């Protein structure tokens, strides 16, 4: 993650990285860098829901943000200005409307390459995307009901790997907590439970994974400003 001048230079000087859009932080401004009909090189080695090489089938949005700093108290991530998030949401709605993109395919770079990529990180407000009707969100009531169950009977990593793969992540299936599995759990936590992203399969994380990977567990709000009702989202199943 870089400031605006460095981001623009990296994305426009013929290097190995490019993106269809760049959203500046101050002032919030959307820059179109690559035509949507052309491939941009923002994803790199990547995978989501059975598909790889996602540069060939995605529209990339880069967001100017300082990223993180390693301090004596631990890693600290920089927040995103609300006006910048508003611009990203508006841009995303426009792209989705024109291309008919399914909600479960609005994802971050970290989702398609856990560990290798961390953006947009734990300060990115994915819940606002859900509230805007852009992406589904785990049903909070179902999550709360399952936490006590996973407290009494913690799941194993074979279960977690199968469920994370069901969501779309590229994880091994050997039942061991290897580096990729832990990095995938961290990525999932940064998105759905950013208050704690330690890569541990605690009861709340297990409940979120269970609900997010089960038919009827995800809710999708209407994108209409006249209706804030969230309904079960089942098209991925």
Image: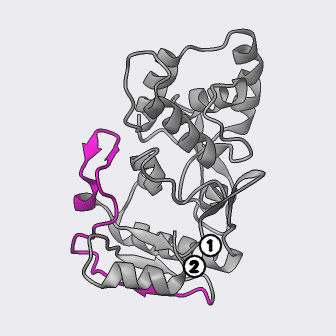
> Where 49 falls versus 228 (above or below)?
above
Image position, residue 144 (x, y; %): 76, 29
Q: Is residue 114 rendered to the left or right of residue 74?
A: left
Q: Which residues are magenta?
A: 27-56
Label 2, residues with CA under 10 Å away: few <14, some 14-19, many ≥20 = some
Please state, as top left, top right, bottom left or bottom right, where the C terminus lies in the image.
top left
Residue at point 60% right, 48% down?
191
| Residue 42 included in the magenta stretch of the image | yes
Residue nearer the viewer, 100 or 153: 153
Q: Is residue 76 rendered to the left or right of residue 45?
A: right
Q: Can residue 107 be seen from the camera position used here?
A: no
Image position, residue 188 (x, y; %): 56, 41
- Residue placed under numbered mark 1 in the picture: 85
Residue at point 55% right, 14% down?
156
Q: Are marks 1 and 2 in contact (CB under 8 Å)?
A: yes
Residue at point 27% right, 81% down?
35
Displayed quadrant of residue 51: top left
Secondary structure type for disc 2: helix
- Residue placed under numbered mark 2 in the picture: 87
Outermost residue, top side: 153
Residue at point 46% right, 82% down?
6
Q: Is residue 174 rendered to the left or right of residue 232?
A: left
Residue nearer the viewer, 205 or 182: 182
Image position, residue 219 (x, y; %): 60, 44
């Amino acid at each position: 993650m870089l400031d605006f001048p460095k981001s623009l230079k990296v994305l426009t000087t013929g290097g190995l990285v490019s993106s269809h859009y760049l959203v500046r932080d101050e002032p919030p401004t959307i820059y179109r860098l690559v035509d949507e009909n052309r491939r941009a090189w923002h994803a790199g080695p990547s995978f989501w829901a059975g598909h790889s090489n996602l540069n060939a089938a995605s529209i990339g949005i880069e967001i100017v943000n300082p990223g993180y700093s390693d301090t004596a108290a631990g890693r600290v991530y920089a927040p995103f200005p609300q006006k910048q998030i508003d611009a990203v949401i508006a841009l995303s709605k426009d792209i989705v409307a024109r291309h008919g993109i399914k909600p479960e395919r609005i994802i971050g770079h970290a989702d398609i390459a856990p560990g290798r990529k961390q953006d947009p990180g734990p300060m990115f407000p994915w819940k606002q995307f859900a509230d805007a009707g852009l992406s589904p969100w785990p049903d909070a009531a179902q999550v709360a009901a399952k936490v006590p169950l996973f407290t009494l009977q913690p799941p194993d990593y074979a279960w977690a790997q199968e469920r994370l793969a069901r969501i779309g992540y590229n994880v091994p299936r050997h039942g061991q907590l290897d580096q990729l599995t832990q990095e995938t759990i961290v990525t999932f936590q940064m998105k759905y439970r950013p208050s704690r992203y330690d890569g541990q399969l605690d009861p709340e994380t297990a409940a979120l994974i269970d609900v997010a990977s089960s038919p009827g567990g995800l809710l999708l709000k209407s994108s209409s400003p006249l209706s804030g009702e969230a309904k079960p989202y089942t098209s991925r199943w």
